[in-house]
Each structure stands twice: as structure tokens, then as C-alpha cells.
Image: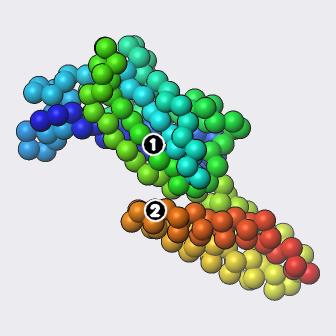
Amino acid sequence: MALKPKITIKQSPDCTHLILCDVTGIYDVSDNPGGYGFPNVISSSSVTLTVTEPGGNVLAPVTLQNGSSDLQPGKDCVCIKVIPTDVGLQGSTFADGVYVFTYIALDATGAELGSFTLNVFLKCLATKCINQIIMETCDSGCLGCGDNLVEVAAKMKAMLDGAEYATSVGAYACAEKILTRVQDQCDYHCTNCG
């Protein structure tokens, strides 16, 4: 059996970084035949991550681990913090949208041992917007506007859930369209109230 790396990616609640976890794990003949350990390789010398942004721009691969770094595949689960500048992005947050992460384990010569591609729908900024809309109901100066804001926020949350589902079934263009509608609502919410 060959090595089959696996990763998970979660976004921090403040939208400033991702938590990338190598969950490849240890080889087990029946439960994890693609894990690290005999008869597969015991570990990799380095791992790289290539990020494709929403819209299709592919960023240059970056090394996340080399020798004694924090990320050491071969353990059950190892996680690292990834900030936008780590992968070549500008700014302090990851924009919302569908990203493609390609994770490649390499040996000491740079030869590929195995790879894993993960499509992830990032929605932190839109989620913050929805929460801010709900918070506005506490300070709303117009009667009835609070109820309208809750309805708007609930609709946006449902749309965001739909975009996440669209990503999970491979309907990436649909997810991006839904996200654009949510972002438009974030720009507009309750400006006509009062």
C-alpha cells in the first residue's frame, strides 16, 4: 500500500488563520492502510501546501515542514497554524470562498510520497457579518427593524449553509454564487431601515 496523506482545515473564529491538521495517522492493515509506517514510509522529509484561491488563482507551493519543524507527519494528528502570508496571500484574513488545498508529502530527495487535495469553503467573514446584524437588534433605533434584521440574518445563515453544502457535493460555482449574494446582503443590511 502507498502512503495516502490526509488533512483537515478549520478557520479560526477571528478569521486570521487556519488550523491545518495532518490526520494521516499510523499505518494499520485494516483501519488505515494509507498511514505512516511499515510497509509504507515511516515519515516524510517535508510537506508542501499549494493553495488555489476562490476564482482559480494558484499560489506558489510553500513548505510547511522541513526536518524539525512543528509539523511532523507520522503521529496520529499534528496541527499547525497557517496565516495568510504563510501561503503567499496579502492581508490579515482569508477571504471567504471555496479554496483548494493540495498537500504533498516529500522524501529527502524531493520526490512525492503521496498527496491529498481538499476543497474547503471558508465563511468566517460572512459569519461575522451575520452575527453583527443580529447584534444590531440590541441597538436598533427603529421599532420593528430588529425583527427585520433577525429575518435577514436567518436568511443569510440559511444561504451560507446552502453554500457550504454546495461545496461538499462539488458544486463550487454554485457555492460562490450563493456566497456573493450573502456578501451583497452584508454590504446592504438594514440601510433602508428607519
Whether residue 41 appears in this view of the structure is yes
Q: Who's the residue at 34% across and 18% down the image?
A: 110
Q: Name the residue under label 2.
A: 167
Count of numbered circles in the view: 2
Residue 148, numbered circle: none
Q: Give yes or no for contact between labels 2 and 1 (Cβ–Cβ under 8 Å).
A: no
| Residue 159 sits in quarter | bottom right
Considering every residue shown, the one lying at the far bottom of the view is: 144
Q: Is residue 118 left or right of residue 132?
A: left
CA neighbours of label 1 inside 10 A, class few (<14), some (14 to 19), many (20+): many
User: Where the C terminus falls, by quadrant?
Assistant: bottom right
Q: Who's the residue at 42% across and 33% down the image?
A: 79
Q: What residue type is labelled 1?
A: Phe
Q: Name the residue under label 1.
A: 101
Residue 50 % position (x, y): 47, 36
Element type where label 1 sits in the image: strand
Residue 14 % position (x, y): 64, 46
Element type where label 2 sits in the image: helix
Residue 131 % position (x, y): 68, 63
Q: What residue type is labelled 2?
A: Thr
- Residue 115 against residue 109 in the figure, above or below: below
Whether residue 135 appears in this view of the structure is no
- Residue 40 against residue 139 in the figure, above or below: above
For marks 2 and 1 on the same chain, the one whose residue lies earlier in the sequence = 1
Residue 63 % position (x, y): 46, 24
| Residue 147 sits in quarter | bottom right
CA neighbours of label 2 inside 10 A, class few (<14), some (14 to 19), many (20+): many
